[in-house]
Amino acid sequence: MTLTQPMMLYEIADRMLETRQQEGPSVPLQLKASFYQWVYHMVEKYDLQSPVVKTASPVELVIQTLEYLLQNYAKPHTLDSLAGVMGRSPGHLSNCFKQVLNRGPIDCLIRLRMQKAYKLLAETKLPLRVIASSIGYQDAYYFSNAFKKYNGISPQMYRKQIKEEDVISLAGRNHIVGSPDPCYIPSYDNDNYYQYLDGGSEDMLRNIKRVPITLLLAFGLLLSACSGGSSVHTGSAAGDGSTAQSEATAGEASNSNENNPNQNNQATKRIVNTSMGEVEVPASPQRVVTDFFLGHILALNVKPVGSNGLFMQNPYLEGQVSGIEDVSDNLEAITGLNPDLIVTGDAQSYEAYSKIAPTVYLDNSAPVRDQVKELGVMLGKEAEASAWLVEFEKNLASAKERLSGIIKEGETATVFAGGIVKNITLYGNAYTGRGIHGELGIPMNDNVQREIDPKVGWATISSEIVETYAGDRVFMAVDAKAESFNYASDPVWGTLDAVKNNELYEIDGYKFYFSDPISVMGQIQDIVDMMEERALQNSKK
């Protein structure tokens, strides 16, 4: 084991040697205390070391990674960070998972978190923000979106169904997590449990039979086939059917072109380059369906025919979504809209969507300016994208000018979420901190800058140490419709300079969840308005 900070251990050892040379009745006690301190730091250093993977076997690497995730599912993970922990490259780790489980490690992590969420939603009355934090989501909004994407219903609806059915066992939840009866296969029946998996090649089935059943169950990897088909199976079936329908639609379009000699079919199609390769798309798509990019597409003066209901509820898009159908990620509903283009941020659904209509993939974590430029090309709206970027920069410059007289040089801000709770979320230059730090450029606290991994963008901390991260101004994301906290009277929060100086701002966490260009501009406007109003209040004191 390589020690990253050995000096403390050396100092303790020196102190033990000096103590050993002394005389007195307290010497044995001092030696024992120093020894325990030395052991504590050795164990701590050991626990902080990344596990070393000594075997090149894909199956053993997958097992070790699953075991690591089982113990650390509440921590923030990306493919890169997980690969680093396991001592492998991201590509190698991902390929091993595909060989053994026919899915990636992050998909397995999501499945594990959902299994934990089912239990907490069904068996406790904990609020969503507590459940979200306990299973690795930075706040209730991200958790709700992930849960609905995975299950088709929101956590609140799932909990409501459980309550209405008065479910005591898992039997009443088969429509989501599958029937437990055939899945809990005895360990001695090791030759048969592979039947309950999601298919795959013969090599994959041979590999997966070497993975302990307990791990497969914990990650929900046996449940989907046990219930007669998971959402993945349903999607595949729908995809097969929708291929024929899509081809029929294409045939009808072809006949229509033949009947209209003035219509040039070549002019109606074009090739765009995406991270998934070249895709032939309509020159001017008329029936667009999207999951994550509703606000982006509306910003380019295109109104989709279908989108995810979560994004349709975005307060910043109020009045702009009438007539758009909520399709979530339901392949049958999407097919029924006869889309001529699908814009997705879900790489795992890309293949299924591509069977319905031409599909383009866009990285939903990319900077908003890059997303607008890329969508402008995909939609044939380059002029609109350029115009939006010019207007955005103009409005942003105006917002910064308004803040120049409020924020003094050297002042910092910190973005939290959760309110006065035991564990809160701390944001860096991403998610809820995007507009405040990223666009408006309000500096973050040095400790936040140093400790938040930019690739992750957030962390969960104990409220007892908020003073370490709190800046001159604090922005607290809460459920604005149901929450507001008295920070001044709290023994921890009340000690912060931001609270004493009336520079703590409660913001609507739901509104600041969204990252499309319309929302980002709205968030910037809201922050500046809020700070101007507060500055006026404070000046009158």
Image (cartoon, rainbow, N blue to C red):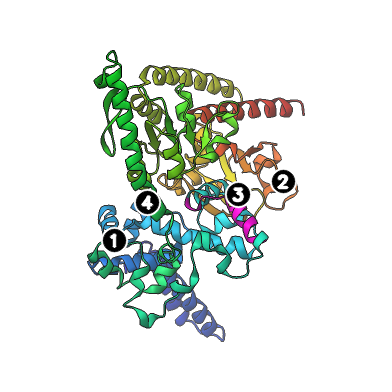
Q: Earlier in the sequence, mark 4 or mark 3?
A: 4
Q: Earlier in the sequence, mark 2 or mark 1?
A: 1
Q: Nearer the viewer, residue 96 or 52?
A: 96
Q: Residue 159 colored magenta?
A: yes
Q: CA distance from mark 4 to mark 3?
A: 53 Å
Residue at mark 4 = 237
Q: Can you tell which quarter of the image residue 377 is in?
A: top left
Residue type beneath disc 3: Glu
Residue type beneath disc 4: Ala
Residue at mark 3 = 467
Please, what secondary structure does the residue beneath circle 2 have?
Answer: loop
Labelled pair 2, 1 in contact (Cβ < 8 Å)? no
Q: Earlier in the sequence, mark 1 or mark 3?
A: 1
Residue 167: give x, y in percent of width and height: 63, 66
Q: CA distance from mark 2 to mark 1?
A: 52 Å
Residue 480: give x, y in percent of width and height: 67, 40
Residue 175: give x, y in percent of width and height: 52, 59
